[in-house]
Image: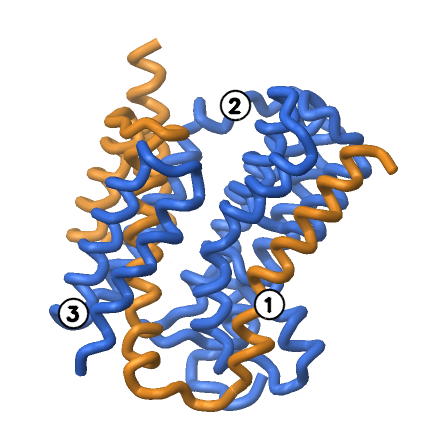
Amino acid sequence: VADAHPGDSYTAGVRAALPLALVVGLFGASFGVLAHSARLSPAAALLMSATTFAGSAQFGAAAVLSQGGGVLAAIATVALLNARYIPMGASVARVLSPRPLLRLLQAQLVVDESWALAHQNGVPMGRRLVGAGVAVYIGWTAGTGAGLVGGSLLGDPGHLGLDAAFPALFLALVVNQLRGRRAIAAAVLGAGIAVSMVPFAPAGVPVLVAVMACGLGIRR
Amino acid sequence: MNNAIVVVIGSGVATAIAKGVGPLTLGRRPLPPWLDRCMALAGPVLLSALVATLTFSSARHLTLDARAAGLAVAGGCIALRAPLPLTVLLAALTTAALRMLHN
């Protein structure tokens, strides 16, 4: 990654992501457990975590399959839930490697957590993104493997309140990015759009539609 | 080919395209200033949209449950400038404790 800023390093990314990688690992474990009820073989579940690497989308696909949904419905769920990675990937394009193949690989490390942690003072940093992404990736795939092996020892992560960990993290990160009236207005508008879309659109779509709030940046 | 393998491959390809299309097409050229200003808002917009939907919805329903209390505690921690891991931990503990009381 070229153009390194001060504070932009792989180790800083790994360090920032470590506590989170553990939580992600627990969710990976519960995906491993769920995979069974979705009729995914252990090998398929592990392969999915290693290649799709997107928590909510994988849970979504598993839910569709376990309810008897078809292959196309499961893939469409993943595509909708992960469509937000189009704007997220685009927003970090500038800080990835200049080499196309490496860029493509680095872009695969973009997940909500690594993307959010890659920002410092609202500016995305390439090495931080890669470091954080690798830490979260290891947590997710190792967790999936542990869940496949350990079976139902873990239970529902909801009992541990872990599903509240992610909004808390993202709230802390967004507060850091609210520089100026326009950013605050866009954040409020984005949250409002997302919430108001919930009853009318399948999961994943509300956050994608919220991207419209970025249009506040068009005017100088 | 078994159905599960089709799902795994289809999901992987769809996700790789979503994540990769921006970096592959945009290159490292600087963007026009208006688009740059819009992209700068992507962080606040996407993060707040995630916070809102992760806290206040389940599937297609708007909800107000123990997660909201966890988020409120997180907000308090942030206002008091508590360290990030503590903030996240207290939010999770609050939610877990409320659920335990409720059941």
Horizontal relation, residue A46 to residue A173: left or right: right
Horizontal relation, residue A162 to residue A185: left or right: right
- Residue A135, image x and y in percent? 59, 58
Q: Amino acid at mark 2?
A: Asp
Against A53, residue A104 (above or below) is below
Q: How is the image coloured?
A: by chain
Measured in 3D between alpha carbons, the distance from the residue under mark 3 to the one under mark 1, in whole angstroms, is 28 Å
User: In the figure, residue A134 lies in which quadrant?
Assistant: bottom right
- Residue B45, image x and y in percent? 29, 59
Q: Amino acid at mark 1?
A: Gly
Q: Which residue is mark 3?
A: A182
Q: What residue is shown at x 60% (from left), y 40% (from top)?
A: A58
Q: Can I make out residue A121 in this image?
A: no
Q: Which chain is orange?
A: B
Measured in 3D between alpha carbons, the distance from the residue under mark 3 to the one under mark 2, in whole angstroms, is 39 Å
Q: Which residue is mark 2?
A: A156
User: In the figure, residue A151 lies in which quadrant?
Assistant: top right
Q: Which mark is residue B2?
A: none
Tag 3 near tag 1, CB within 8 Å? no
- In this rendering, which labeled residue sits more in front, label 1 or label 2? 1
Against B45, residue A200 (above or below) is above
Horizontal relation, residue A137 to residue A122: left or right: right
Tag 3 near tag 2, CB within 8 Å? no
- In this rendering, which labeled residue sits more in front, label 3 or label 2? 3
Q: Which residue is mark 1?
A: B20
Q: Colour of chain A?
A: blue
Residue furthest right in the image: B1
